Amino acid sequence: MKQLNCATLIANLAKKVEVESAFVRALPGFSIVGLPSQSIQESKDRIKSALLKIGFKFPAQKITINLSPSDLKKEGSHFDLAIAVLIALQNVEFDLGETYVFGELGLDGSVKSTQTLFSLLLALATTKKNVKVLIPYSIAKRASTIPNLTVYGVNSLEEAISFFIDKDKKEEFLHTEKDPLFKNPLIIEEKTYVVNSDYPLDFKDIKGQSRAKRAMMIASAGFHNVLLEGSPGCGKSMSIKRLRYILPPLNTKEVLESAAHRSLGEKEVGFEAVRAFRSPHHTSSKPSIFGGGSSSAKIGEVALAHNGILFFDEFPHYSRQVLESLREPLEDGQVLISRVNMKVLYPTKILFAAAMNPCPCGYSLSLQIPCKCSEAEIVRYRSKISGPLLERIDLHIQMDESKDSDEGLDSKTMHQIVLNAFKKQKKRGQIEFNAKLQKDEMERFCICTKEALEILNEAASRFGLSYRVMDKSLKIARTIADIENSDKIESSHIIEALSYRLRH
């Protein structure tokens, strides 16, 4: 019996599959077992034709191929090459190593790529380091830009066989391309990051709104959820659309995760230094936002925003079912999709951003245009967003109708401030952003002065703050302290953090 490594894509994960072969004394036959899909069962005819083309003579024995683990459903025609190589080299001693083999076979023995192969390679690279893969030559150059992969490309089954039996030829198939994104990385505490330096949407386009810009900087540096409220045209959506360009840098794993998620919904993806930005329309269905499907658990907008921003414009207009379902991904950082034949857990470490008008007509905060809404209409409008959901939003900003012509801070300056705060977090040994810290991590990193702690406790007593609001205020204060380059949380940081809380 011989064995090769392959993998199958289950939702967003690459699951290792061991392809085993055995020749047994029995009536000649060819069978594939281990929950193969119809596309894998059809591969038998392609494999036979390809093997005959290279002069392989089938023995008078039964050939059995097992795809292990046998309780995992396998899909895709990329198993062809691994099966054919095992059959061709059944009686030949060769070094398999830890090489993964992928490729669809043509009837003439050519090796072809498949629609999902790049997604599979991306998913494989996020879970394993320094993986060797033998893949079709047509995709090898592009795949070699993926970090963590050593890529060998072949055009035919014959070349794939020579790869295993002729060590001198192995280097001929090696591809060593490198994506420009990873050529000049930023190194922080021995970890590699890619930094965005392009600002197609710049905060300098927003006149005035210094408080909103300050809040955007705090949200970015600590990955805090933010809600902007104000009259139409005051710059709510403009601010949030510019937020993605000043977010902290992505590490190599996060770049791969983002590309892997996007590849599930797009045919062609590349690597990007900017974090994901998803903005589903308020008429979008719950499955399209959170993922799902009748039989499979397809990825939704929330999971596609992983490591980036999920933006809900016109916040109260989303259905109550969608809004209440946001609680799990915002609190736990994951969304679970359950179907009859599978359960898939998508990570959702996101910065949630929302924008809303203060009332149905939008002008209750305006000093120039009178509001036409009754008090009952305003209460009904605002009550669409529940208290528990609002508590999961860290920063609440009311934007005014600024006529200030001052540009204030631009995106490049704001991004540098965010980057300095990010470096400070990493240098004190912090793994997660401030907003995502757990209780034990807060005790290590959110160190307050005596005066700051007294102010927080007094505010909790006077305003009846819940423990969640107190924790969020402390995390915001930690981010403000990072921006101010302070090791401890001072009283001024607590006061500013409390100023961003929602007032009922």
Image: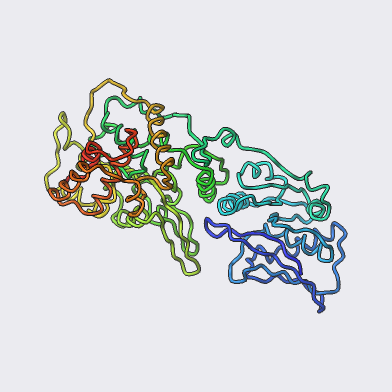
Say if residue 390 shows up in the picture: no
Identify the residue at the far bottom of this view.
Answer: 26
In the picture, measured across the screen, residue 298 lies left or right of residue 502, that is right
The percent coordinates of residue 165 (x first, y second) are 83, 55
Judging depth in this view, the residue of 309 and 249 nearest the camera is: 249
**Count of marks overlaid on the render:** 0
Q: Residue at x 25, y 38 (%)?
A: 490
The percent coordinates of residue 215 (x first, y second) are 29, 36
Q: Residue at x 40, y 31 (%)?
A: 415
The percent coordinates of residue 142 (x first, y second) are 65, 42
Question: What quarter of the picture does the N terminus occupy?
Answer: bottom right
Identify the residue at the far front of this view.
Answer: 450
Way the structure is coloured = rainbow
Judging depth in this view, the residue of 428 and 326 nearest the camera is: 428
Judging depth in this view, the residue of 422 and 357 nearest the camera is: 422
In the picture, measured across the screen, residue 231 lies left or right of residue 3, that is left
Toward which corner of the image does residue 84 lie, by quadrant?
bottom right
Judging depth in this view, the residue of 192 and 60 nearest the camera is: 192
Toward which corner of the image does residue 409 lie, by quadrant?
top left
Q: Residue at x 53, y 40 (%)?
A: 192
Q: Residue at x 40, y 43 (%)?
A: 309
In the picture, measured across the screen, residue 299 lies left or right of residue 232, that is right
Say if residue 79 shows up in the picture: yes
Q: In this picture, is 398 found above or below 120?
A: above
The percent coordinates of residue 195 (x first, y second) are 49, 34
